[in-house]
Amino acid sequence: MKKVSIVTGGAKGIGAAIGYRLGKQGYAVVIADIDENAGKYRENHFRSEGIDSFFIKTDVSSEMDVSNMVERVYDRYGRIDALVNNAGIGFSGKSIEEQTLHEWRRVIETNLTGVWLCSKYVVKYMKNTGGVFVNVASTRAFQSEPNTEPYSASKGGIIALTHSLAVSLSKYNIRVVSISPGWIDTSSWQVPPRESYLSSLDHGQHLTKRVGKPEDVASLVAFLVSDDASWISGVNFTIDGGMTVKMIYIDENVIQDSLTMLFNDVEFSYQIRKLIEKIRKADNKENIKSKLDEFLKLL
Ligand SMILES: NC(=O)c1ccc[n+]([C@@H]2O[C@H](COP(=O)([O-])OP(=O)(O)OC[C@H]3O[C@@H](n4cnc5c(N)ncnc54)[C@H](O)[C@@H]3O)[C@@H](O)[C@H]2O)c1
């Protein structure tokens, strides 16, 4: 019998690539997304590729939406085998003093409460058959840029919710895992698809020498929901091209490497670095200006 998956936020980005991959592996794919236009587009896309797909407009932060969505999935298919809690929104740019309680709640309710709600309502229909939840966290659960508190906290919460659910639901043969993607370029899975504007510097700073693709994440999810992963539960998998294991001390070599990645030209980058050194050591403004003129002539 055909297995059934629910992918929240499955209309665009990483969720769409996950749905596509599961669909190609024979799952029916329910796209539970708040964006009606993109959801319909993705349903049509999947169907045109021979995937049994069904879009249900859902706000994962709404208990009524989630309970209705899960009921409709069960009514239609009579089973639920995999729940991919992927829907999420970002947050950046405002200091903690400027962040509002409304903004904090919106991010937490979408990214964290949404995972809890979908899990709560799916258990009822998965407890007799067993199944898998894959919760999409982020490397932001472990490291941050400034002014991202709601997002980082929501993703850290997903890691803890994952091991808690895994322990509680093991009696029903439900495995619960989380994944933490790093930088994923979702442009080709947007609606409509967008151009990618990544630089060689963006790619080059990863150990794998490239920014991630939604398909990279989809491969991991496909493995985690499969029987090949039947001994895995409660843990988190980082998928980030090695970014989070890289320790960075800013020194001359790091500057040289960054310039080389940026210009893709070792000799030119070396000259620029030497110029930067000279400018740093210049003892008055006139001197700096003449060095800058020299720099501009090089470009
Ligand atoms: N792209 C990255 O670099 C990256 C890195 C780490 C983690 N993530 C996580 O991966 C997940 C997917 O991110 P993405 O980059 O593909 O984003 P995206 O914006 O491309 O896609 C997110 C999808 O979720 C849907 N959505 C938003 N709010 C919703 C709600 N309340 N209810 C239902 N659906 C909702 C959107 O309509 C959209 O289709 C998110 O949880 C994000 O935090 C992304």
Image (cartoon, grey):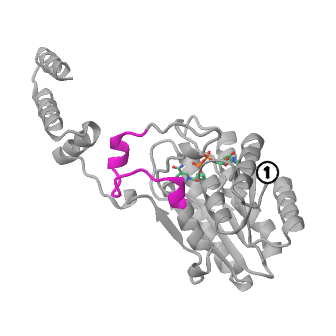
In the figure, 215 relative to 202: above or below? below
Residue 211 at what x, y percent from top left? Answer: 42, 50
Q: Which residue is drawn at the image coordinates 59% and 75% (left, top)?
A: 234
On the picture, is 240 further left or further right than 6?
left
Residue 253 at what x, y percent from top left? Answer: 17, 47
Q: Quadrant of residue 294?
A: top left
89 or 186: nearer the viewer: 186
**Magenta region includes residue 213:** yes
* Quadrant that contains the N terminus: bottom right
Q: Is residue 232 visible?
A: no
Query: Residue reaching furthest top?
Result: 286
Q: Residues within 10 Å of mark 1 (few under 14, many from 20)?
A: many
In the figure, 114 relative to 188: above or below? below
- What secondary structure is marked by label 1? loop
Residue 136 at what x, y percent from top left? Answer: 60, 60
Q: How many marks?
A: 1
Mark 1 residue's CB less than 8 Å from ligand 1:
yes
Write the start and end of the magenta stretch as one range: 198-217
Residue 287 at what x, y percent from top left? Answer: 10, 18
Q: Which residue is drawn at the image coordinates 64% and 68% (left, top)?
A: 25
47 or 280: nearer the viewer: 47
Q: Which residue is drawn at the image coordinates 28% and 53% (left, top)?
A: 248
Q: Is residue 177 visible?
A: yes
Q: Quadrant of residue 207?
A: bottom left
